[in-house]
């Protein structure tokens, strides 16, 4: 048996007991590394005659290739064994899952965002204004005459002046309508904005909170009419609640519009047949609307002969309650996690 | 406003009455919304007129009477307990056996203490036609026995509608005004009660100029005052029909004089007043402004002190009524009254509202005057109507009258263009329909120019002032349902004013939600004491105070989000045992130290307003749960994450001044790191001060954590910009520095960063690895905070890791080692002055 064959035999004896990649590597180094036992044999070539050298060279390469190929086989074998072991693992995924904590948006935020997305699609920009507003914008510019009983309907919170004085002329805004004034003062027609926001009224019962949220829409352009208002309100309800629901306007009074109208929507739950939500009427009262009063245009320096416009407004909280079936307004402002968790998506 | 369908129908010139359902539908379609309706009198259909034929005492009971009652066909025996039974021949309301009275009260034949009784003699209350339950109802002797009562008093059967009348429609606060709308809609005439005016009477009734005088300085407050002096008045109960009519409208019958004023109020919408003229000094009235602090007792026995702004109706000496608001006790009509002064007036609406508010009154009278009554024909009509009723029902005799006139608004002259109707409504309303509407409402229309009608608005509609007001009237009657939903204007794109603050708020909300927190919305007002811990943020002098809060605990605008979050924490801890992670994004309010800097068209107003600043607050608390994972560092992590979501690197630094509402040992400042700029402080984070939690309804020893972003101070970052990835690997080096426990890790990192920036100047090819590539992650990482074995008490070993990289080549171990040593030594030198004990381990 030649030295090469002896080495191959020695290798074969060892390779079958190797059971890790590291040992396999070590084994390779021991035989084929620079100082490995097989590599050592190569040095003998220098002392050989040329013809012997050729035969030895061929035998050496065979031996080396054989070792490498058997190393590879062993590697594959080990790999396969590891794979099979890995596949034997089990884990019971019917156990309670480990979940990341999920957070929620408040239903008012959620509803406001959906409303804004809808109105943006209809070509409205979004505007905001201060919560603490001057009567000049909350009332006067909106054609609420001084000492007019229309002001009583607003149940206004008055704000003391900076030094505690009464009669500061500053109020907690009673509606988002002052944003109409601000928008018309700072923008040029055509104006198409929606203004969502917090508003305040002295009212506290199961269906009224002293703080609530409204959204206001305003469109000013040449030749805008009640017919456009109706069309836009219909577009809005279709986009928001789905098509096929009719809307209805009823004459009403808001000092800053003329003509003024309340607007109702066919109940999205019973589609007009009558149910609990709409108190069997088939209709849901949404809010107020109307053509911008010429006196309002005059107060912001827009010529009512050149431009006409309309405005509408309704409650975001009420819309949220409607959408999510929230039974009690107070739940909205208590911050109870058990309530908030009900709006995961 | 309650409207009787019976009464309304009396005013419509039609053959058949209009059914209540149709009236209701018409009114709602016209903007007089019917809020609810009530049907009356259905249960008393069987009640008839009975005649007393004989009265005998009950054999066994002193208080009972055995009555022989004639029901129109036969005499029945009825036992009655009333003490006011009329004499034989008197008429009463009788419910025969089989009748069912209101409240499902069935009348049966029964024995009362051994005596048979077939039916019941009823009181007003039992029939629900009046307030008087003390005795039985006594009917006029002219009523014929056996006739159903409702045939003789048709007001009994009625449907009453409750209207929500908007403040622009004072005319709809009387039946005539409502009937005018209905008649116009139905195209029928309006039938008003017939009047017998004083003009043309013989003998002539004297003009008494001294009866009413109007002071010069009260002309702006009283536009018109009609006074009638009446004598031989018999104060007595009103007739049954009037009492029932008033009862149906929720008014209590008192006596004929008072009832007549109420009746005319409900009919014409015009408040009236009657004075006992004998109690008026000199029997006359003066319409004048009150003297400052002049006392008066109102007829509800309230002592008030008048203001010089108030208008009063005085006699020769003292105020006898707060004009348009409430009469005085002194000259109130009583049983003994025989002479009266009847007042019908128009008072200036804003002045009446101011006066009523000043004294805290809200009466049927002020309600109408402040909206504006008809100072012209309507006033005359109401005055004459009341005069006639006093003559008919109280035997009054008019002995004199007068009228004074002050300032009153002129009738509005309005040009109505047909083109304007089309432009505003978006539809063509036929000219004849439009004209019929306007004339039906009392507008005088001259359509000689078919395109521009000259109109005069009626004085009963003070809301009709300009062209669009008439357009609205046309629309109301044309019907909003007939206006098509057509977009006639092409939707041209409008200017979009991008508001970065709103987008930023939305991103903060999203990131806090992603962090697993629940959004709450709290009230913007709170109690003053709850704001006290935040005086360092907003001094008390800058708190915005509500003048008329609903509760004292809600009288101040919040200066901070924490009180609201703590309110929510209380609710949650009280009700469940879960971990509580909340956030709120909302505004806080404060008066600015100097007026708001404002510009643009709204600047003048904006400079007067308090400042409103957006804040994001988070509150974390394990509550009563065991393992919430909420601690101070999850609070700082959440807020840093929120900033990272805004595209900013962030870190928490030690407080430079103690934040009073946070635990003194567990608090820090939140810094936003801007590339190439100084860090910007944008918030705070820490454990909520235990004293604040102790002041709340919370379990002892509870810990809660708060973090806040001042959203408006967070710098804006543009669109995220990408860089290529590093081609060569970074090499990191660890070091362990021993510093006192109280020394902030951030300051150690800062010292290393400073030392590095100096040292790297000499090695331009090498950088700290995180600086360029890992947004939001520092190249100097704090890996571990070790305390315990091998470290002195009060000290800690901070294990730090620094990564080095050369963008254009591989770095060698040797050069990194050399550089790192240099940085560590320099950093220690920087730290030594503050931390003498610092040492490298
Ligand atoms: Zn429904």
Image (tube, coloured by chain):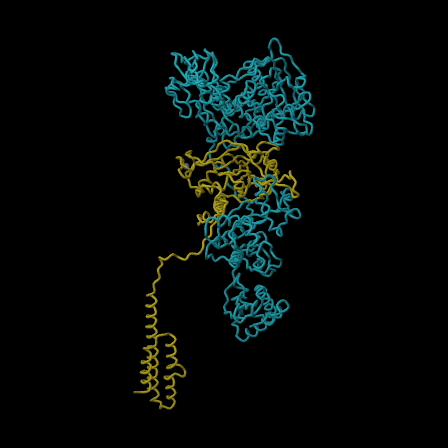
Position of residue B329 measured from the top left corner of the image (x, y, whole percent): 61, 23
Q: Quadrant of residue A82?
A: bottom left
Q: Nearer the viewer, residue B337 or A300?
A: B337
Q: Which chain is yellow?
A: A
From what the image shows, is residue B552 above or below residue B50?
Answer: below
Residue B454 can be seen, yes or no: no
* Residue at x 56%, y 36% (from the top left corner): A155
Q: Nearer the viewer, residue B521 or A34?
A: B521
Is A44 situated left or right of B681 in this image? left
Q: Quadrant of the C terminus of chain B?
A: bottom right
Q: Quadrant of residue B420?
A: top right
Is B160 situated left or right of B356 in this image? left
Q: Which chain is cyan?
A: B
Position of residue A157 measured from the top left corner of the image (x, y, whole percent): 58, 39
Position of residue B728 measured from the top left corner of the image (x, y, whole percent): 50, 69
Residue B615 can be seen, yes or no: yes
Ligand 1, image quadrant it occupies? top left
From what the image shows, is residue A334 above or below residue B833?
Answer: above
Q: Nearer the viewer, residue B586 or A207?
A: A207
From what the image shows, is residue B488 above or below residue B261?
Answer: below
Q: Residue furthest top?
A: B203
Q: Quadrant of residue B374?
A: top right
From what the image shows, is residue A33 above or below residue B531?
Answer: below
Position of residue B602 measured from the top left corner of the image (x, y, whole percent): 62, 43
Q: Residue furthest front?
A: B60
Report the label total. Answer: 0
């Amino acid at each position: 048996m030649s030295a090469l064959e002896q080495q191959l035999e020695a290798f074969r004896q060892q390779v079958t007991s190797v059971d890790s990649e590291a040992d396999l590597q070590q084994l390779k180094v021991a035989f084929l590394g620079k100082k490995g036992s097989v590599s050592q044999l190569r040095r003998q070539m220098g002392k050989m005659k040329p013809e012997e050298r050729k035969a030895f060279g061929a035998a050496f390469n065979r031996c080396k290739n054989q070792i490498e190929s058997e190393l590879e086989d062993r590697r594959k074998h080990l790999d396969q064994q590891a794979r099979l072991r890995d596949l034997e693992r089990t884990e019971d995924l019917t156990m309670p899952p480990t979940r990341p904590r999920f957070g929620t948006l408040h239903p008012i935020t959620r509803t406001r965002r959906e409303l804004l997305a809808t109105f943006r699609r209809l070509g409205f920009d979004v505007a905001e204004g201060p919560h603490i507003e001057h009567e000049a914008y909350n009332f006067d510019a909106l054609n609420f005459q001084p000492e007019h009983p229309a002001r009583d309907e607003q149940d206004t919170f008055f704000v003391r002046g900076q030094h505690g004085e009464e009669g500061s002329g500053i109020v907690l805004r009673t509606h988002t309508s002052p944003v109409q004034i601000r928008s018309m003062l700072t923008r040029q027609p055509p104006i198409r904005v929606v203004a969502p926001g917090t508003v305040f009224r002295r009212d506290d019962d199961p269906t009224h909170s002293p703080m609530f949220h409204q959204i206001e829409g305003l469109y000013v352009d040449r030749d805008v009419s009640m017919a456009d208002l109706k069309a836009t309100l219909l577009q809005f309800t279709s986009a928001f609640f789905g098509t096929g629901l009719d809307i209805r306007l009823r004459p009403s009074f808001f000092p800053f519009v003329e003509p003024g109208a309340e607007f109702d929507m066919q109940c999205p739950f019973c589609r007009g047949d009558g149910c609990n939500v709409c108190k069997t009427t088939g209709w849901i009262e949404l809010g107020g609307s109307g053509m911008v009063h010429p006196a309002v245009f005059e107060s912001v320096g827009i010529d009512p002969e050149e431009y006409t416009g309309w405005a509408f407004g309704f409650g975001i909280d009420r819309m949220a309650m409607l959408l999510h079936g929230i039974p009690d307004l107070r739940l909205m402002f208590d911050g109870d996690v058990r309530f908030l968790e009900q709006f995961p998506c | 406003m309650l409207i009787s369908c019976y009464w309304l129908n009396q005013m419509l010139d039609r053959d058949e009455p209009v059914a209540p359902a149709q009236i209701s539908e018409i009114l709602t379609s016209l903007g007089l919304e019917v809020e609810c309706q009530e049907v009356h009198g259905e249960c008393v259909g069987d009640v008839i007129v009975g005649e007393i034929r004989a009265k005998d005492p009950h054999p066994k009971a002193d208080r009972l009477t055995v009555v022989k009652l004639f029901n129109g066909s036969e005499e029945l025996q009825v036992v009655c307990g009333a003490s006011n039974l009329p004499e034989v021949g008197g008429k009463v309301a009788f419910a025969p056996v089989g009748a069912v009275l209101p409240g499902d009260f069935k009348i049966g034949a029964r024995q009362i203490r051994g005596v048979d009784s077939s039916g019941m003699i009823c009181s007003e209350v039992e029939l629900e036609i009046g307030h008087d339950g003390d005795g039985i109802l006594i009917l006029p002797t002219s009523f014929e026995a056996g006739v159903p009562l409702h045939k003789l008093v048709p007001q009994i059967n009625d449907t009453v509608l409750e209207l929500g009348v908007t403040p622009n429609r004072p005319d709809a606060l009387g039946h005539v005004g409502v009937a005018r709308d209905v008649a116009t809609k139905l195209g029928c005439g309006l039938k008003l009660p017939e009047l017998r005016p004083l003009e043309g009477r013989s003998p002539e009734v004297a003009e008494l100029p001294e009866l009413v005088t109007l002071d010069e300085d009260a002309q702006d407050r009283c536009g018109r005052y009609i006074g009638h002096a009446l004598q031989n008045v018999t104060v007595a109960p009103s007739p049954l029909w009037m009492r029932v009519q008033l009862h149906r409208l929720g008014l209590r019958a008192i006596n004929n004089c008072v009832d007549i004023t109420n009746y005319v109020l409900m009919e014409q919408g015009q408040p009236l007043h009657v004075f006992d003229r004998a109690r008026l000094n000199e029997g006359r009235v003066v319409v004048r402004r009150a003297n400052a602090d002049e006392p008066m007792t109102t007829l509800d026995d309230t002592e008030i002190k008048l203001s010089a702004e108030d208008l009063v109706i005085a006699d020769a000496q003292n105020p006898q009524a707060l004009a348009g608001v409430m009469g005085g006790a002194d000259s109130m009509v009583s049983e003994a009254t025989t002479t009266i002064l009847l007042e019908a007036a128009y008072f200036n609406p804003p002045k009446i509202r101011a006066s009523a508010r000043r004294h805290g009154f809200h009466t049927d009278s002020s309600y109408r005057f402040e909206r504006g009554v008809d100072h012209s024909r309507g006033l005359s009509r109401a005055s004459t109507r009341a005069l006639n009723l006093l003559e008919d029902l109280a035997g009054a005799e008019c002995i004199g009258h007068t009228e004074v006139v002050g300032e009153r608004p002129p009738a509005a002259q309005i040009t109505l263009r047909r083109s304007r109707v089309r432009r505003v409504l978006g539809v063509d309303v036929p000219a004849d329909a439009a004209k019929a509407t306007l004339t039906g409402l009392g507008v005088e229309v001259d359509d000689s120019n078919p395109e521009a009608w000259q109109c005069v608005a009626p004085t009963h509609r003070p809301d009709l002032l300009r062209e669009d007001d008439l357009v609205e009237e046309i629309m109301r009657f044309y019907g909003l349902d007939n206006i098509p939903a057509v977009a006639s204007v092409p939707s041209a794109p409008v200017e979009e004013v991008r508001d970065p603050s709103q987008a930023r708020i939305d991103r903060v909300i999203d990131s806090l939600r992603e962090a697993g927190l629940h959004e709450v919305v709290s009230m913007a007002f709170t109690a003053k004491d709850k704001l006290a811990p935040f005086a360092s943020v907003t001094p008390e002098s800058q708190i915005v105070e509500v003048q008329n809060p609903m509760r004292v605990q809600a009288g101040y605008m919040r200066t901070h989000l924490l009180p609201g979050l703590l309110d929510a924490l209380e609710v949650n801890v009280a009700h469940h045992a879960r971990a509580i992670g909340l956030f709120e994004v909302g505004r806080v309010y404060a008066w600015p130290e100097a007026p708001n800097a404002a510009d643009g068209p709204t600047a003048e107003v904006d400079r007067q307003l308090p400042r409103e600043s957006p804040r994001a607050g988070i509150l974390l608390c394990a509550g009563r749960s065991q393992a919430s994972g909420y601690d101070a560092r999850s609070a700082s992590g959440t807020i840093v994450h929120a900033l990272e979501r805004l595209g900013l690197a962030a870190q928490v630094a030690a407080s430079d001044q103690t934040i009073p509402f946070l635990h003194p040992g567990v608090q820090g400042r939140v810094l936003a790191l801007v590339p190439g700029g100084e860090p910007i402080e944008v918030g705070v984070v820490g454990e909520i001060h235990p004293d604040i939690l102790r002041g709340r309804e919370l379990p002892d020893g509870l810990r809660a954590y708060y973090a806040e972003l001042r959203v408006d101070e967070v710098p804006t970052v543009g669109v995220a910009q990408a860089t290529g990835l590093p081609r060569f690997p970074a090499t990191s080096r660890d070091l362990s520095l021993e510093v006192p426990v109280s020394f902030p890790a951030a300051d150690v990192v800062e010292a290393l960063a400073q030392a590095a920036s100096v040292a790297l100047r000499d090695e331009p090819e090498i950088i700290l690895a995180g600086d360029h590539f890992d947004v939001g992650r520092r190249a100097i990482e704090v890996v571990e905070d070790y305390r315990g074995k091998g470290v002195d008490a009060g000290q800690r070993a901070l294990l730090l890791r620094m990564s080095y990289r050369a963008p254009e080549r591989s770095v060698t171990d040797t050069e990194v080692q050399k550089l790192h040593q240099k940085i560590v030594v320099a950093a220690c030198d920087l730290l030594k002055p503050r931390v003498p004990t610092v040492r490298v381990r």
